[in-house]
């Protein structure tokens, strides 16, 4: 049976990459480019694995030949090592196909060598075409098409597949993997818009870093998310000389994201707002002020901008800022105490007798808010703990795991919170998937009667774990006194 058919027949959770691996052309580093191309053609292969002393050292694909040989008029008699992508990411044969999918989505690649780590033998390569090829809205292909898009209108059409991608993944993947894949789509759209902006405007006059905040920075987007972003500009920036370029770039990207379904931030936290399009020195001042004077507005910004990631541009600008932020937060007990108090604003929706506390919607329906009172309590507590520990991670699950490794949270608490967060997150995503399949707009409002008795019991348990997690933080910082 062909790999494509096997991939369509089984859930990616039950398929291992060894089930999808195909033989690969293998050549020595000293083999010429021309001979390698001939071998790939004879084998009808899009890739070749490059070895030295039988050990994998690189990979070449059709794209390498187009970009590094044909386009640059590289000598075809040169050694293949001169154009290979060195030290490619690999997977062991027992790795789940979901891991291959996520690596491809995160790094915009379509081929991963499969290597037996014990025998150090190369088994072959798994390709993107082996992963859910029957689904045109698969995240891997969607991301690949996004990077090939030539205009905003094409990106707008491609972004319409996001809801379908969520529905297909929710049925077989964890919430962590679904959110990562959906966030990778948002990340790809943003990067492509920046590339298109630079193509239209020309090279940037000074270095810059495009930042994403909030759910995209945490890799926790769902099918419908707004945008939170900003620009760090080099301190060489001069408003009179460079302002117009970066204003146009920011407007192009933010308008493009809105066209693709990522609504403008209602609070104006976007690079199109001059307040969030500033030199590095100004960003330093912002964070110093928020940390030293944690008033309500500073705390609001902190819940957004302390989940921050560089998505495009000069990463060193962001790293410089990020390291200085973590050094400050670790030392500021006052700031952490206020952040801890702020993390208690949204309580899990459980009453005194462990019954659900429902919120009445405009249509009269009583529901559970699975964002503000579901995932947010855990997200907020994890953020405070990681800032206190000076840990650089942003994803909530990875933050929790890092806290466990740093002995900031006990193993028992960690296991319970991880399970609770996963169940709450997956309940939220499944609710959105049901709405999408019914042709409705997705939201975070879950009516208890759409859940089984089993789900309701486990959701109450998960909320109780989240509540205990909040209380432990409150006691550590005596945060209840500030509320």
Image (cartoon, grey):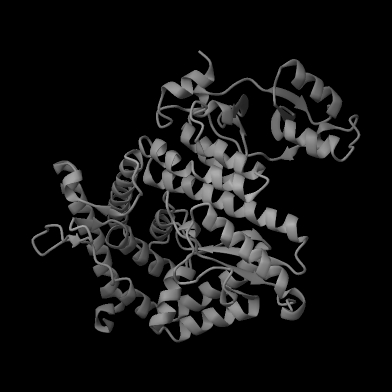
Horizontal side of 82 relative to 170 (left or right) equals right
Residue 169: give x, y in percent of width and height.
41, 38
Number of marks drawn:
0
What residue is rendered at 47% in x and 35% in y?
A: 98
Instruction: Tell me where residue 120 appears, x and y as whole percent.
Output: 61, 29
Residue 398 visible in this rendered orientation of the protein: yes
Q: Residue at x 64, y 44 (%)?
A: 147
Nearest the viewer among 396 and 373 is 373
Q: Residue furthest bottom?
A: 293
Q: Is residue 32 visible from the viewing direction of this image?
A: no
Where in the figure is residue 471, as x and y percent of width and height?
A: 24, 69
Please report the residue visible at 78 percent of the width from the left and 19 percent of the height from the top.
39
Q: Quadrant of residue 54?
A: top right
**Vertical placement of residue 48 versus 419, above or below:** above
Q: Say which residue appears at 80% left-offset and 31% top-offset.
A: 29
Name the residue furthest top: 1
Q: State left or right for residue 159 relative to residue 380.
A: right
Q: Nearer the viewer, residue 122 or 298?
A: 298
**How far across and how far down the image is residue 113, in percent?**
62, 31
Residue that extends furthest to the left in the rendered view of this protein:
353
Closest to the observer, 392 or 102: 102
Is residue 29 shown above or below 356?
Answer: above
Q: Front-most of 319 and 202? A: 202
Quadrant where the image shows the C terminus: bottom left
Figure quadrant of residue 370: bottom left
């Amino acid at each position: 049976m062909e790999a494509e058919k096997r991939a369509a027949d089984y859930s990616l959770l039950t398929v291992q990459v060894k089930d999808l691996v195909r033989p690969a052309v293998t050549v020595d580093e000293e083999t010429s480019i021309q001979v390698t191309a001939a071998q790939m053609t004879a084998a009808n292969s899009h890739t070749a694995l490059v070895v030295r002393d039988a050990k994998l050292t690189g990979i070449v694909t059709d794209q390498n030949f187009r970009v590094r040989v044909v386009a640059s008029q590289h000598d075809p008699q040169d050694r293949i090592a001169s154009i290979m992508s060195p030290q490619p990411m690999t997977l062991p044969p027992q790795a789940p196909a979901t891991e291959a999918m996520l690596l491809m989505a995160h790094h915009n690649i379509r081929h991963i060598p499969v290597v037996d780590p014990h025998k150090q033998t190369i088994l072959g390569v798994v390709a993107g075409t082996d992963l859910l090829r029957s689904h045109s809205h698969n995240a891997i292909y969607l991301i690949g098409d996004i990077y090939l898009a030539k205009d905003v209108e094409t990106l707008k059409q491609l972004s319409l597949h996001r809801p379908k991608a969520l529905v297909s993944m929710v049925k077989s993947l964890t919430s962590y993997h679904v959110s990562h894949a959906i966030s990778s789509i948002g990340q790809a759209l943003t990067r492509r818009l920046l590339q298109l902006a630079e193509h239209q405007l020309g090279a940037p006059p000074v270095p810059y870093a495009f930042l994403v905040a909030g759910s995209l920075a945490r890799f926790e987007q769902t099918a419908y998310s707004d945008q939170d972003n900003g620009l760090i500009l080099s301190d060489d920036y001069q408003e009179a000389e460079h302002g117009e370029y970066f204003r146009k770039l920011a407007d192009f990207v933010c308008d493009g994201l809105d066209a693709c379904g990522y609504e403008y931030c209602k609070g104006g936290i976007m690079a199109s707002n001059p307040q969030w399009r500033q030199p590095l020195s100004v960003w330093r001042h912002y964070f110093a002020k928020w940390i030293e004077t944690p008033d309500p507005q500073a705390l609001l910004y902190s819940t957004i901008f302390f989940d921050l990631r560089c998505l495009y541009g000069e990463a060193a600008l962001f790293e410089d800022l990020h390291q200085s932020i973590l050094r400050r937060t670790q030392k500021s007990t006052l700031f952490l105490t206020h952040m801890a108090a702020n993390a208690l604003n949204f309580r899990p929706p459980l009453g005194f007798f462990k019954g659900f506390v429902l919120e009445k919607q405009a249509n009269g329906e009583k529901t559970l808010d699975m964002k503000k009172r579901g995932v947010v309590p855990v997200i907020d507590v994890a953020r405070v703990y990681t800032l206190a520990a000076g840990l650089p991670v942003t994803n909530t699950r990875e933050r929790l795991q890092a806290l466990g490794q740093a002995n900031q949270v006990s193993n028992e608490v960690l296991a319970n919170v991880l399970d609770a967060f996963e169940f709450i997150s997956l309940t939220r995503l499944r609710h959105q998937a049901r709405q999408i399949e019914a042709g409705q707009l997705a939201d975070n409002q879950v009516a208890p009667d759409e859940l089984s008795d089993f789900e309701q019991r486990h959701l109450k348990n998960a909320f109780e774990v989240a509540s205990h997690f909040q209380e432990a933080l409150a006691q550590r910082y005596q945060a209840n006194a500030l509320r």
